[in-house]
Amino acid sequence: MTTMRDRDTQDGEAPELPLNLRSDNVTGIAPPILDAILRANRGSMASYGADERTLGLGERFSELFGKRCAVQPLGTGTATNALAMSLLTPPWGAIVCSAVSHVHDSECGAAELFTGGAKVTPLPEADGKLAPETLERHLAKAGWGRTSEVQPAVLAIAQATERGTVYQPDEIAALAAIARRHGLKVHLDGARFANALAALGCAPADLTWKAGVDVLSFGGTKNGCLAAEAIVMFDENLAEPLRFRARKAGHIFSKMRFVSAQLEAYVENGLWLRLAAHANAMAARVATGLEEIEGARLLHPVDINEVFMALPDAAREGLKADGFGFYDRGAGTVRLVTAFDTRPEQVDAFVASARRHAAGV
Amino acid sequence: MTTMRDRDTQDGEAPELPLNLRSDNVTGIAPPILDAILRANRGSMASYGADERTLGLGERFSELFGKRCAVQPLGTGTATNALAMSLLTPPWGAIVCSAVSHVHDSECGAAELFTGGAKVTPLPEADGKLAPETLERHLAKAGWGRTSEVQPAVLAIAQATERGTVYQPDEIAALAAIARRHGLKVHLDGARFANALAALGCAPADLTWKAGVDVLSFGGTKNGCLAAEAIVMFDENLAEPLRFRARKAGHIFSKMRFVSAQLEAYVENGLWLRLAAHANAMAARVATGLEEIEGARLLHPVDINEVFMALPDAAREGLKADGFGFYDRGAGTVRLVTAFDTRPEQVDAFVASARRHAAGV
Amino acid sequence: MTTMRDRDTQDGEAPELPLNLRSDNVTGIAPPILDAILRANRGSMASYGADERTLGLGERFSELFGKRCAVQPLGTGTATNALAMSLLTPPWGAIVCSAVSHVHDSECGAAELFTGGAKVTPLPEADGKLAPETLERHLAKAGWGRTSEVQPAVLAIAQATERGTVYQPDEIAALAAIARRHGLKVHLDGARFANALAALGCAPADLTWKAGVDVLSFGGTKNGCLAAEAIVMFDENLAEPLRFRARKAGHIFSKMRFVSAQLEAYVENGLWLRLAAHANAMAARVATGLEEIEGARLLHPVDINEVFMALPDAAREGLKADGFGFYDRGAGTVRLVTAFDTRPEQVDAFVASARRHAAGV
Amino acid sequence: MTTMRDRDTQDGEAPELPLNLRSDNVTGIAPPILDAILRANRGSMASYGADERTLGLGERFSELFGKRCAVQPLGTGTATNALAMSLLTPPWGAIVCSAVSHVHDSECGAAELFTGGAKVTPLPEADGKLAPETLERHLAKAGWGRTSEVQPAVLAIAQATERGTVYQPDEIAALAAIARRHGLKVHLDGARFANALAALGCAPADLTWKAGVDVLSFGGTKNGCLAAEAIVMFDENLAEPLRFRARKAGHIFSKMRFVSAQLEAYVENGLWLRLAAHANAMAARVATGLEEIEGARLLHPVDINEVFMALPDAAREGLKADGFGFYDRGAGTVRLVTAFDTRPEQVDAFVASARRHAAGV
């Protein structure tokens, strides 16, 4: 077990399979997180979040963010986002977001369910990012006060975005300022928050409350946890309604300590940022390696651990034939997602395969 | 790790704290389950339940139940029950259950949420069990076809019950027959299904589809899992709607393999039944030990791992003073819940403390 | 048309059918209300409630109740009650009411739908009325703050009750005081509010805000309107959320002026109280007439326009044979509901029929 | 009263105000409809739709549509559309419609509420109409079977459209065929169904079940009713679930006969088509009159009773100054909606005002 504590990202055994870059949720558990689960498995403990570990999370996250905040551990990103929305919008509200946002197109309408029928309104984006003008224009022409129309109530942005890019702190602040001026609350979907932070090198506060964010979906699962997400509320008054909403939706684990233990370990001594930085570096390595292929082309900047590329047919098909995993998005494009446990030599093998096939060797 | 595989219920270390009988969810993870989680942490795997482990559960549970069935792994009992209900009743339906059922009074109205507003109708019970006459009488006077009234749509019974008792297979069959004659579907809340099975010594089929049960909430968490429950559907057509309902409610884990691995290990080679039988035996030991106390009295038969008792004030207060944990239900009564990891010597210490304090020593 | 203005309750034609006492909603439109509809049918008018008539209702009802209040006209009693609930309870709340309340057993779970899954909790009653001790006891043992349990959020009482009785103003105040002390809001279902007022001879304020009521379902339909109900909010801040909730639920009529015109006419110059007083008097006449039958027995006091009685089989069957309408509640009991348009001679014919048949003539 | 029966569209009194073309719901009640309400106000009648008038609607509409169908009378268009959707899609479904559809942008998210959180997906349109290629392309790339995405379940088209245009029967059939091939149900929003029929001169069947429509929102309110809409179901099995859904949503009137009486009269002897044809003719007169203004331009074909135009500022502002009513849509454009009661001389005065002001006179 000692070795697990020493090494964050990989255990001692060589993986059997070629690299799978389909998503960062095809990964397992990072050793320090697993170790925390094992350590939490001692003695009895109060259930449903009344245990000391869970109760201590507020303090830990308050330190982390440099501001008093409330934290609710959860098990999935969809629950985290949708329950967060239910705190921020009435049933007749609209959740304004980018057209490629996860909240809009990848959560089976969970936000609509948990809000009692609010509408998710997708706006045009570029590289996954919403421009201030786009938001301003949309809000300017909203049917404020007209009951025939849903009322914009939440701005939901993702950091990092669903296209592997990041907002600068002042970009978030600019969007949030517009939103707040119109009375909207601001939600940040941080399924890959650690990757964004690692990329930007700024403080958690800079991307959240200091920039005008009210509620953060804090993700851990994609970055080394078994299943650990959290809603971080910079308005502590939201904590009590959330406790009830989460329980009513069946999202409070009886053995909550095991989720909280993951979150504790995740943010301890910067583990989360080290894991994310590694994943980011591996994506850069992938991008650099593939860019040299004739006909290959990056579709978006590679800010974090995701690479969106156009790749020649030969490369794509060849990679598949060699057993590599990735998401073929159609029209000659792919999404490649590295993770905390991606190894350089695996990346190199991936790149080599693509190059070889592209070259028709 | 070898020791873990050999011993189901306890690891090698002595627990530090006095016995905590507050609930069986104050426990940790049984070693074989933890071992399964560790084994599942190898290599990458398809996410959101598309992995082999999850896909194989249908086959495993079909063998277990002697009938083709579909299985959806989930993380909490409340999600399991409430999503199951959403499959069985329209929004204008009623869920008929005992007045002490968990679905009614301990899930914060989750069934009401996930069904789109169905009503939960509690009926009088004895020892946690619904009598056929009670059900028959209620259904006979229901306002069938009158749109002013919700229409009984589901019979929800718990096995074991919330009072630590079990239904005999023919008792379930009698209730289910009445329900079905009136067009209701039958749901079995099996949060402690293993304990009931272990107590009765019958086959899983005898308590479920053979007795007329349509859908089972299959619990693992209270009996040694970290977080592993499942909806078992004896009508496989329910599987597809459930996949979408569960996803929309944020209940599908991205790293589902870790939940499925728990369920696999849980039912492998009878582990679940051994864990439950042990817990049951410990409850019997508690009951036997406490019954001798002057003024102590069992409130319900002790069929499984729960003991409901009236205990003299001195015993109750003394146990608390000694640091033992249990649920003080008020009016001089307690609930004591043993678990897979309760040790005989812990029980004996508990009993000794109660006796000593009751005797005024 | 002159005659219509002069006579509130009946038009000039003799009714063809024997008296129908099944409910007060089997009636048509009182002439002054119909006249108001005709008058409203002049010229064009802003739609969806932006017309002057609708906008003026707040002022009118504020005068009527002696306090600034907001008013939302609606078309059905179920919509009125359920939307009112949605203003007063979060999804994890409980609506506490009597076991025979309309909100609980006659609205197909509308409250559960519009509140996002709140629970309706029926408490024991006598003559349709909730006793303060019953409420106090229930609230004292509620699981306050425990997320496993819904949290009492609304006290819903009916005035008049579903058993044809009325609360005295101080009885409402006593219940409301208990509710408010525990943080509940107070709702009054006034489907037959006019009948209660007419019976008590007190001011509308005495039964509502002065007694601690937050929101009133104000009924007009049963007492002479075509379809006109209203939510009266003594906290004006509720008006804006309600406008959106009602619109989202499809409850805002485009030609709202026709609903508002009914409400205007209904409360003008005491029409509503005259109509209700007449209905009440007719019920008293029914009760007095039937009580003399051997074996007949009143089941509840006859405070308003409803008579609950046990009637001998011969009387019940004879009335049916003679073509009279009423609600046979089984077990030898009936509900007889008079209305604004019930005529004394009709009542006398009804009573005579019952007596004749009971006497075996 | 005799005059009312003789004349469909206008009563004898001259309107006081300049013409209001803001919407067709600023109008009152057409005399024959009002007459039907008066006639229905005789004697007592069974409530909540159990009356003969309501029960007879199925037969009447079956004749009208040349096919057995079920009919549910309702009071608002939003309720009609949203309840219809709730019959056709599960909570995880998507309602595919044009980007300017009423269901999407003018009903405050009612469809999202009544379906339990389904998503409304707007697609690009031209003149308010959806092109088959647009639908085909969208459905081809839907994430069928992927639980992360809502599943297209309903095609919702409006006839006439929200831009005052109509689909030819074969255009509806083409769209419906695509929808059905992908397993979608087809809904037709007929808030102005009569206007479309009158414009096309075809049979109701041609625009509905013969073209592949499953459920029709049948509108009466905009075309002369007080408040009368209906859901027409060509699959009669939908009637029972709808009865319960409508009741649970508070949409069943206790004095339903008054809604049903409107519908009866509306379709009797072609009244609805005459009223609509008149409204359509008035819109044509408006369009013809305004088109001659320099700088005026029709934005969409004028198929029914709606005119969408660009109008010079002088004309727009002058009309307002003269007291005429219309919807100023911004950017120099207006919507002008004529109705069953619009008089030619009113139109001529409207046109004259616009011309005069445009000419700077």
Image (spheres, coloured by chain):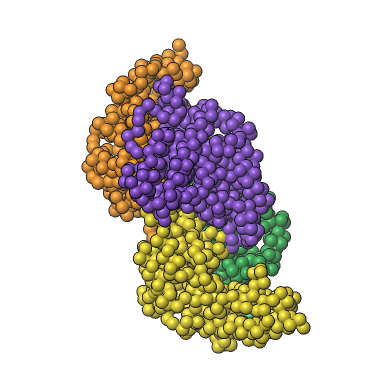
Chain colours: A orange, B purple, C yellow, D green
Badge count: 0
From this view, report whether residue B113 is shown above or below residue B210. Answer: below
In terms of image quadrants, where is residue A224?
top left
Q: Residue at x 63, y 49 (%)?
A: B175
Visible in this render: residue C297?
Answer: yes
Which is more toward the observer, D327 or C45?
C45
Q: Residue at x 62, y 74 (%)?
A: C335
Asked if residue C84 lies left or right of residue B212, the reply is: left
Residue furthest toward the top? Answer: A361
Q: Residue at x 37, y 48 (%)?
A: B359
Quadrant of the image containing the N terminus of chain D: bottom right
Residue D213 lies, in percent from the top left, at 63, 50
Residue C297 lies, in percent from the top left, at 62, 78
Residue D17 lies, in percent from the top left, at 47, 75
Residue B39 lies, in percent from the top left, at 44, 24
Q: Residue at x 58, y 35 (%)?
A: B201
Residue furthest toward the right? Answer: C361
Which is more toward the observer, B128 or B157?
B128
From this view, report whether residue B195 is shown above or below residue A342. Answer: below
Which is more toward the observer, B49 or A164?
B49
Quadrant of the image containing the C terminus of chain D: bottom left
